[in-house]
Amino acid sequence: MKNSKNTIAWIPIVIALSLIGGIWLGLHFSNKVSHTSGQRKLDNILGLIESDYVDEVDIDSIIELTIPKLMANLDPHSTYIPASELQAVNEDLDGSFSGIGVSFTMLTDTVTINEVIPGGPSEKVGIMPGDRVITIDDSLVAGQGIVNTDIVKMLRGEKGTTVNLGIKRNNSNNLLTFEVTRGDIPVNTVDAAYLINPTTGYVKVNKFGRTTYSEFFTSLVKLKAAGARNFILDLRGNGGGFMEMAIMMANEFLPANSPIVYTRGRNDDDESRVFSDGTGSFIDSELVVLIDEYSASASEIFAGAMQDNDRALIVGRRSFGKGLVQRQTTLPDSSAIRLTVSRYHTPSGRCIQKDY
């Protein structure tokens, strides 16, 4: 009984020592793994600025300005995206955004509506092409030197919110006012799809967004129903986007077990080999792919797969030569980084990355 009591008495001490030892080991190995001499130097510099610099400074603001310069030392495609810009950056590829449904240009320092999306919020309230926007929510925007990106921020917003526009129309002497309720606006990545002759369909893809494959496939099906047996895919000026969309599009044209792309990265998770599965609906259709010096990333993956499998005729100029794959990671403050994690290679093994 006495030995039992002595054993019980030692248990809390053993637990406490184990916890202390675990904490020490965790800190010891954490410092060895996570904090290099350069990282410790940076921490020291920031600490000295915060404690000793002649003026009081906002350390977070300094870090915010420094991160883009840090990323610029990696490669041109690894970038930092501030929290204030992340939504707009993602919307470009996500397939839709919330806004008023117009496109515009700045003519003589005035926002001029070029196009009103059919069925969109602006058309519903009567805004027309050619209208000039003078005020937005009672703020004068005409003649104020406001840049396009700031106008876009003022017009976009959460679905269901409203924005008041003061419009000058050529046939009216008075300023017209419109209250527009923001709604979902589709971002189309297929600019055009039509027959250029009775048996040949033409499709222009401007980027590889989340909806590109479905848009592309729908366009091909409609063209095939109209008589198209051969296709021209125009990727000129297409700077890329989601690699998965290029892979799915390539799969539509390739027989089973044809190599599409493979990637090599620092980590095993970033290495992959992708092959077609033979389920494509256009395996027997002739294909021509148009590219130029601005065709990059996913455009090059698609064109490379078609060329190396002798599946299509590639016409145009030497493509951009990006050759790198980025992964976007959202940070705790809702900013993000797009970090290059691997290089992609065409089926023949060519890495088309240019020298930076």
Image (cartoon, grey):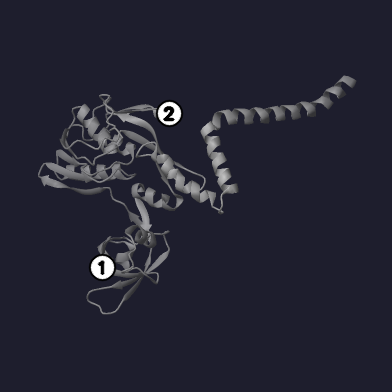
Q: Residue furthest left?
A: 197
Question: At which x and y percent is residue 52?
Answer: 59, 48
Ranked by sequence position, the earlier of labels 2 and 1 is 1
The percent coordinates of residue 293 (x first, y second) are 21, 40
Nearest the eye: 4 or 104: 104
Whether the residues at callouts 2 and 1 have beta carbons within 8 Å, the answer is no
Camera-nearest residue between 38 and 248: 38
Whether residue 220 is situated above or below residue 307 in the rendered picture: below
How far across and how far down the image is residue 298, in percent? 29, 37
Amino acid beneath label 2: Asp
Relative to 74, 302 lies left or right: left
Q: Secondary structure at mark 2?
A: helix
Residue at 56% x, 40% y: name it: 43
Q: Quadrant of residue 306?
A: top left
Answer left or right for 40 relative to 319.
right
Residue 1 visible, this orientation: no
Q: Residue at x 63, y 31 (%)?
A: 27
